[in-house]
Amino acid sequence: MIIDFRSDTVTKPTPHMLDAMLKADVGDDVFREDPTVNRLEKKMAAIFNMESALWCASGTMSNQVAIASHTRPGDEVICEQESHVYYYEGGGIAFNAGCQTKTLAGDRGRINARQVLASINPDDVHKSHSSLVCLENTSNRGGGSCYELEEIEKIRTVCDEHHLKLHLDGARLYNALVAKNEKAAEFGKLFHSISVCFNKGLGCPAGSILLGTETFIRQAIRVRKVFGGGMRQAGFLAATALYALDHHVERLATDHQHAKRIGEALQKHPLVKNILPVETNLVIFELIDGKDPKGFITSLKQEEILLLTISDKRLRIVTHLDISSEMVDHFLETLKNLH
């Protein structure tokens, strides 16, 4: 039995999800004629109380489409220094949108309104035009940390006062909604655009949704086309997202409980130097000085337990749909024998 903690993207579709795929009613989504994609887009727009939505192949695509749709070449995008749009999207802000970035040092991946205000460039021909702020909730490299709605409201006020757009990379937003007992519509009011992944905590094989106004989504459709994002009969994948929305949201609390158990055990382990607070399904920790993370990973791999390093010092564990309580028990027992 392999226990795969590397990411929540490694999940396999459940039998019921596969059945939903097989029964999906499909058409050509580039012609906007796939009924299952259309149903998903309408459902997500309604959930977030936003005007329109667009199916995309991945979270990276939905983020990059959003950034390119909000900006002009030469603009500046403000984000946290370890945010996914900057750290893990292959330089896409520069390559796809022709924009530069201004990165801010946040608190576990979260920036605040004061930082955003201070980072906005003056109206000076020598400076790039600050046009977009990107937030990430939950923050991947921040250990699954969640923003407080009050801080987002303050950031939105700064953006409005200075004519900036506000985008949310909500790849794991449903984890935040469950952990904080918040409503999706509250986020719909605060952001000009939101991307939400189905291929992480919700357990789908692929896909993300981009939300915004009708005008914004019309532009996003053009950008998605340029990016090669027209997937034709995408309803087979959209069907998995519809299934997940009905069956895989509330169970995210189980992933959070598993992560907290693991975090508590690591906190007490003699090989662990420190651990980031565990809020959702990500556990990021650092080993004591002199202990090689790669050796630690190799020892666990020999026991068929997989996890990742995210730097030369930090390791990451992610709980998800395919991690059971019994697997967590086994991991914690194995952990006791590591010295």
Image (cartoon, rainbow, N blue to C red):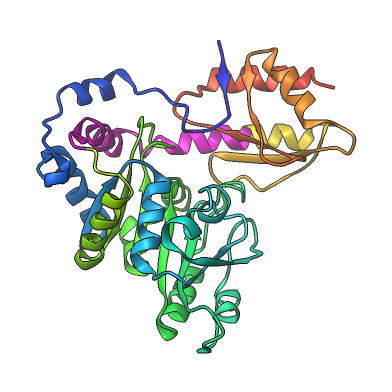
Residue at the spot x=60%, y=75% of the render? 115
Q: Quadrant of the N terminus?
A: top right
Where residue 242 appears, as percent x and y from the top left, is: 24, 37
Total tally of numbered discs in the picture:
0
Residue at the spot x=56%, y=32% of the render? 258
The image quarter containing residue 117 is bottom right
Asked whether 62 falls inside the magenta stretch, the response is no
Residue at the spot x=46%, y=32% of the render? 9
Where residue 153 appears, as percent x and y from the top left, is: 44, 73
Q: Which residues are magenta?
A: 232-261
Q: Is residue 187 left or right of residue 27?
A: right
The image quarter containing residue 273 is top right
| Residue 159 appears in view | yes
Front-most of residues 203 and 193: 193
Q: Is residue 329 left or right of residue 202?
A: right
| Residue 50 appears in view | no
Where residue 140 appears, as percent x and y from the top left, is: 56, 47
| Magenta span dominant secondary structure | helix
The image quarter containing residue 321 is top left
- Above/below status of 335 relative to 275: above
Q: Quadrant of the C terminus?
A: top right
Where residue 224 appears, as percent x and y from the top left, is: 29, 51
Asked whether 240 falls inside the magenta stretch, the response is yes
- Above/below status of 114 relative to 65: below
Front-most of residues 258 and 316: 316
